[in-house]
Structures are given as structure tokens and as C-alpha cells.
Image: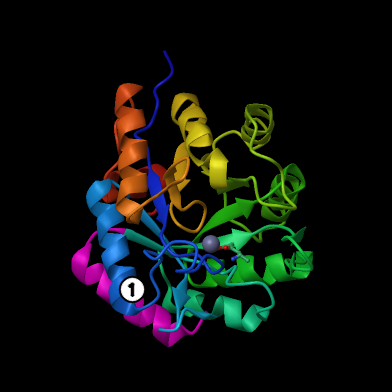
Amino acid sequence: MIKVEKLIITAAICGAEVTKEHNPAVPYTVEEIANEAYSAYMAGASIIHLHVREDNGTPTQKKERYEECMKAIREKCPDVIIQPSTGGSVGMTSDERLEPVELSPEMATLDCGTLNFGGDEIFVNTENMIKIFGKKMIENSVKPEVEVFDKSMIDTAIRLAKKGFIKEPMHFSLVMGVNGGISGELRDFIFMKESIPCGSTYSVAGIGKYEFTLATASIISGGHVRVGFEDNIYLSKGVLAKNNGELVEKVVRIAKELGRDIATPEEARQILGLK
Ligand code: KMH
Ligand code: ZN
């Protein structure tokens, strides 16, 4: 029988696009962000995927704001892995997006391709940008979570890893169900997970209605899971989640039913080669 690793749950607690109008529990302030991280951590999340906001909800990549939020999260969740976003929000410059990497966090996201992002929005990640971001992460000893929204982005990551811009083994985040990216059907998940190189790890972030179906598929397949307000605000159809912890708790319940143990932050560090 194949040995299946414990399940790493990432909580994407805030995002850059979702607002309190969508769900009043979406955090903006430092205190709200720390409280949401704590609810996810207590429920079983070992990684916090972090975007930060100004108090009025405007997304920002300012290093100082990240520093403040990371400190507040660390006070409540001393051993959790904090993974800042370098995606930021659509329209930000590369320099802005890279600011949190200067804090040398254990991990950060590395988005591996450009895609339509609904309406007139384009989330830009040119090949040269990916190279610059990848190099900066290597220089700052940051493990990238390679975010891919379609199969071609996996191929790009493999190509750039061969050229030395991303260290291997890679850890992928299969973000599925974004308008403009691959959809989140089981067929798509199997195609994506079977396209990543042998020896790498992956986590699945199903957007909206795909969150828990893809989480279940990933739990069964030996992958890892991301949930949180960035991806989905509902606990079940029409029922808003009261906090990120409720979304994590649901994944923990499914995993337990399916016989998959949950990784602590220390175990997640081992699995991801962070130490
Ligand atoms: N907010 C999106 C434009 C990431 O965190 O690296 C990009 C995003 C990806 O959320
Ligand atoms: Zn993000």
C-alpha cells in the first residue's frame, strides 16, 4: 500500500478581491486578520496563505503591513507557516507584489502564468516576471508555492525549474475554477495532478462550488487542500461561513471520515522540506 502523507491544510483567510459585502466576516484590519488566522489554525490549518488590506479593505502589498499582520498572527499561532501572496491584486506592479518576500517568510506564492480574471481584468505574470520572482525567492530562501491556474502553467514551472529559477522538488497549488482558468471538474483535477513532476507535492484550491468536492478528491489522492474566504465564502449552499475556521473544520471532518490524519505545522514543514 502507498504511504500517504498527513494532510496539510492551507487557509487562504482574506484574499484581495472578496469583501465584507460578500461575507461580513472577511478580515481587513490587523486584528481581524489575526483572529481569522487563529480560527483556521485552531481548526487544523498549518499554513496561512496571506493577503493583507488597509483598514478600509483596500488590498496592499506593503511590507510594513505584512510585517504587522505576521507579528499579530505569530502571537496567536506561534508555529503556523505564514505564506504571503506575491500575486497581490490585479494591476499591482512587480515591485509592489514582491515586497513581502523581503521579509524572508518561509513560503510565498509564485504565480506561473497570465490569465483572464473575469470582465476586463488580466492577472499578469509574464515569463520574465516569473523568473525575477523565482530568483528573488531563491535569494531570500523562500519556498515558492507554485500557483497554477491551468495545465500550461505547470509546464512553464517545470521549464523554469530546469533553468534554475525555481528549486525542486516543487510544491504546487492547483487553483481550479477561476473564471479564465481551468474548471474544477474531477476530470480536470486528475489531468492537473498527473501533470506535475514526480517527487513534487500539491495542494488543491477549488474556487466557489468546487471547494469541498476538490478537497475531497485531493484527500483521497494523497494531495493537500486549501480552503478559505479567498476561494469560497460558503460553508454549504447558501450558508455563509462565520469564519475561516468553519471551512477548515469541514475539511478536517471529511479527512477524518476518509482516514487521513491532519499535519501539524511541524509535520507540514517536514513534508514540504522547509527545515
Ligand atoms: N488576487 C489574485 C490576483 C496569489 O495569491 O499568489 C492573485 C492571487 C494569487 O491571489
Ligand atoms: Zn492569494
The three-letter amino acid code for the residue at tag 1 is Met
Position of residue 107 relative to residue 140, above or below, is above
Compared across the picture, whether 130 is left or right of 83 comes to right
**Is residue 163 in view from this perspective?**
yes
Compared across the picture, whether 90 is left or right of 206 comes to right
Q: Nearer the viewer, residue 213 or 136?
A: 213
Q: Residue at x 29, y 58 (%)?
A: 80
Q: Quadrant of ligand 1?
A: bottom right
x then y, percent, for residue 51: 47, 69
Range of magenta residues:
60-80
Compared across the picture, whether 238 is left or right of 185 comes to left
Q: Sort mark 1 into few (<14), some (14-19) or many (20+) by Cα contacts within 10 Å.
A: many
Name the image quarter holding the C terminus.
bottom left
Identify the image's colour scheme: rainbow, by chain, secondary structure or one colour.
rainbow
Q: Is residue 217 magenta?
A: no
**Is residue 169 in view from this perspective?**
no
Position of residue 134 relative to residue 257, above or below, is below
The residue identified by callout 1 is 70
Predominant SS along the magenta part:
helix
x then y, percent, for residue 248: 34, 45
Q: Quadrant of residue 68?
A: bottom left
Name the image quarter holding the N terminus.
top left
Compared across the picture, whether 167 is left or right of 274 comes to right
Q: Nearer the viewer, residue 219 or 234?
A: 234
Q: Residue at x 33, y 73 (%)?
A: 70
Q: Is residue 70 magenta?
A: yes
